[in-house]
Amino acid sequence: MPLTLTRLVIVDDNDGFRRASAALFNGDGFTVVGTAATGEQALEVTRTENPEAVLLDIRLPDVSGFDIARQLRDAASPPQVILVSSLSRDDVEGRLDGLDVLGFIPKSALTPEAVRALLREPR
Amino acid sequence: MTLPDILCALVWAVVAIAMIGRRGSAAGLAAAVVIAWMLPELLPVAVLWHRAVIAHALLAAPRWWPRTWTARMVLVIQYAAAAWIAPWLHPLGAAALSLLLVAGCVVEQRTQASRAGITAAVAAAVAFAAPLIIAPAGASAEMTSWLYAGALAAAAVAWAFDMRARPSAEALDTLIELDVDAVPLASRDDMRRAAQLRAAHRVLREEVDGGVRELTDSRARLADAAMRAGADVRERIEREVQEPLRVLAGRTIATTDGARERERAAREQLGLARQDIDALIRGLAPPGIDRGLAPALADLARASPVAVTVDAETGRLDDRIARAAYFVCAEALANVQKHSGAERASIRARIDEGMLEVAVSDDGHGGADVHTGTGLASMRDRVESSGGVFDVETGDEGTTIRAAFPVAMDAAKVEEASDEPPEPTAHRPAVTLMTLAAFAVAGAVAAWWMLAASPTRTTASLGAALAAVAFAAVAVASSPLGIPGRFRVGTAAAVLSLSATAVVAVSVPGVPWPVRLIAAATLGLASGGILHLALAIAASGRYPRSERFAVPVLATIYGAGAAFAAAWLSVTEPARDRLCRLPCAVWNIPPFESRTASDAFAVALTALAMLAAALTIAVVVRAFRREQAGIRAALVLTALAPVLRGVAGMLPDPHPLVGARADSLLGAVLWVSLVVLAATLLVEAVRGIRRTAVARRVIEDLAHDPSPGSLARSLSKALRDPDLRIDYWLPNAGTWVDGYGAAAPQRPDEPVAIVTRHGAPLARMRGEAVLPSAELEARLGAAARLVLDNERHLAERLAQREELVRSRQRILQASDAARRRTERDLHDGAQQRLLVASAHLRQAIAAEAPDATALDEDLAALLDIIERLRTISRGIYPPVLADAGLVPTLESLARTASIPLAVSAQAIPRLDPPLEHTVYLLVRDAAAFARTGDRIAVALRKRNEHLTVDVTGADGYREGAVDDRLEALGAVRTDLPDGVRWEIPCA
């Protein structure tokens, strides 16, 4: 059990999924400091809460998660970005090239352990 | 009047006659020139009027009034000058007027691009200006007069050539002659041409029909594929997702309180996901359609929020038709719910006379329009691709949508009834007519020989000799013309020529008695000949006539005329003995004075002439109204001749055979009118020969270039009328299209003539040379209508082809849009719920730990369902394709493919969704059908509004279902040495 909780922001347009995943992560080594349903909200929450990591859905209603990832990289203290989607790894992999993100986790495999594993990985 | 004046007047008169029958003002203006030229004889003040009228002819013809304002101004100035100014004008002013005329003519003619017209204008200007220059220079009055009249005569000739080059009424005439059965196809060459034309048309027709059939099939395959894909997805989702979900949703495993709550939340999400999927797949394919259309429609009605009554009795149906009918009802009900504001709706489905009829009605506010929005259009596409017909009836109250499908026969192959023109029949050369014409020519030569040998020449003998020559020429010129009907102008002309020869023979003394007797009998045929001519001229108009009565009447008049004339000669000039009236004794007729017998036969002859005159006038009056100007002139003259003959016969002491006293004015008028009649007929005959030549050229053209619209093209070329257009009426679409099947709007104030067939519009001719509809109707032959009909059929098929191409694209667009929507709905709805459920389950597992084996199993099962649904969803429409476009999707495909797949693409932008999807499917299929060891390379290039896709190295893949989609997008396939290249149009 880590001594400090990782500050996390969850970005997803589906309310149910946002709530369920927040419940899943809270306490299990993470503290969910904010959630967002759109790309715009995501940028706002990240700026105010300054999280260590962001779980970012790829298919958002206003902009693509890829674009948000690019913008987050330019923030004052850029968070670690983990892209999340209900798409499979094969569909996403090719599009990660040149993006400064920690990695991709399919939603069906999204667990605190999987996120921790990515965060521990040497970059 | 001096000799040069007379000659110049003659040249203009000949031009006027030659212009008779041409549409427009040419003949009238030329006649006006002749009158204006002669006018100073009566009215000295009108000395310069002919200049204004000549200027008028040069500037305006073939119209009555010039088109441009400059020309109109010039004309007004010319008339004003002729009326008031010119007689007192200084020679320099007259010269200025001439220059003005030349300038006006050149401007006017240049816009019409005719060298002959400019030549005429220059000749006229030289004529007007020359006297001013050469008279003061010392030329004699006679020389000036010759130069003036000569230049004006030259202007007349040049002007006539200009008129010839203009489009005229010949478009219609040629069309009539195009009637391949009526054109005298005497020679083997003609027969060959006609056969070629038919063969070429048949090939073209089959080609176009084949194209339409292929498109119809391709469209049906596309619609079918869309429908089948929906059914497949539905079936797969039911088996692989819904069934296992049902099991998962209904379980409770957790034991601890915290875990139980999480588990309940998870199972609730699973139930909701099932409901979402249920609603979604109902739209993909009709549920329960396997049980029949009626139960499926009943289910549909139950699910609708609007009250729907169903009245369906259909029995077993072809699967494709049942699905199409269901689709129409489902779409129509969706429209009712979304747009109509209706409270009630009804569905009716019945089989009647081999047709499945489906109707969906509502009581809403109506206003549905098949041309706006895609819903109704895609319904129509679906119905028509199953061989059915679709109809929308909408008003202020409610809308009814109807579809009818053929169920008794194979819908895709409804054979078109063809209306093939009849095979051409051989036309034998008119042997009888040619023989008669030869006799007429021989007679005319004999008449001139007798006249030359005779010591005395009378008006009658001179006029008769001229008429004999003129009618012989008509007979010769008419003999190659195949005018249908029993009465031919050529035959009548030959009879009249021989009669005229006979007049010379009886009026010249010293001809032996037997020849005189034959001549008298021949002369007696004249009355019948005139009637015969009237019938023949009227017959060329080709309207129904009572030939049944005409033939015996004409035969009687011919017979009686010959008999009376021969008898008269026999009693006045007995062969045997001047004193003995032998014929009377032989036939046991009581003897009477020779004078009485002679008078009696003379009266009989005159009475016969009067009867023939009356009949001729009757024929002429009946035919007159429907004829062209040239034919009308001939008809008037034809009626005039027997009237003159009859009047002359009643005058005291006429020559009983010749009719008029030899030197009487009446006799002269009679002969002049006959000669003018013959000249008119000659002009008509020559024109007919030229028309036939044009028709032959057109037929040959058509046979060599059998392509859509070729009739209008070759007519336009042959007639030198670039504006000539032929449009065709499409009764189903209710529009006019050109030969290529493209919409053909009519320009305002454009001359138009409509051709009908079986009472319905068939074609429409547009252009300067077009006749009014009524005249066209009266003159157009049945076979010409068939030629037009053939072209119309092509135009209709081409229009149909265009519509099929559009419809195929719509089907593609609609089915792709539906797939994209389904994928998105699955992603946003059911997939998210399942993922939420998985998160809940994970929490439940955490709460239940470490005793959570059963829940772990459920989570594994749920993750498996999620994965399956993702796979199915990607098959419906790849999400990456929707989000990121073609190249990332193909690269993703390359990573997962079982064989090496190399994708190279140069800056491909986002494209039309159906196009992206189609190219994706092409590559996916190539990869799916690849054989072990294949190395596939895909190269994409976008250049000049085309996307080029090269797929090489896929030996296992040659043709596939995606080809229909590619063709629907207008793609063109080229075979490469080791693959295929598709070039797809894109914006």
Image (cartoon, coloured by chain):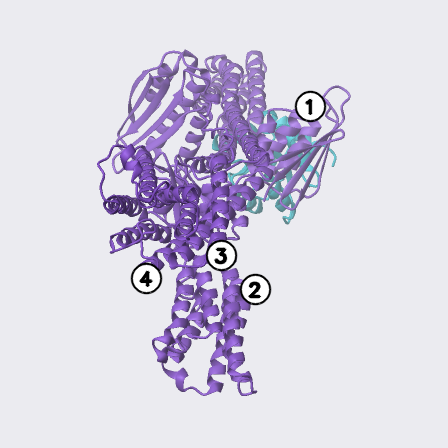
Compared across the picture, whether B676 is left or right of B190 comes to left
Q: Which chain is purple?
A: B
- Identify the residue position indicated by label 3 in the image: B452
Are labels 1 and 3 assigned to the same chain?
A: yes
Q: Residue at x 36, y 79 (%)?
A: B44
Are labels 4 and 2 assigned to the same chain?
A: yes
- Identify the residue position indicated by label 1 in the image: B957
Residue B744 shows up from this direction:
no
Place of residue B596 in the rendered image (x, y in percent of width and height, measured from the top left): 23, 45
Sequence-first disc among 4 and 3 = 3
Q: Residue at x 36, y 38 (%)?
A: B369
Place of residue A120 in the rendered image (x, y in percent of width and height, measured from the top left): 70, 32
Q: Which mark is residue B665?
A: 4
Q: Which chain is cyan?
A: A
Q: Nearer the viewer, mark 4 or mark 3?
A: 3
Label 4 environment density (alpha carbons within 10 Å; few <14, some 14–19, many ≥20): few
- Identify the residue position indicated by label 2 in the image: B115
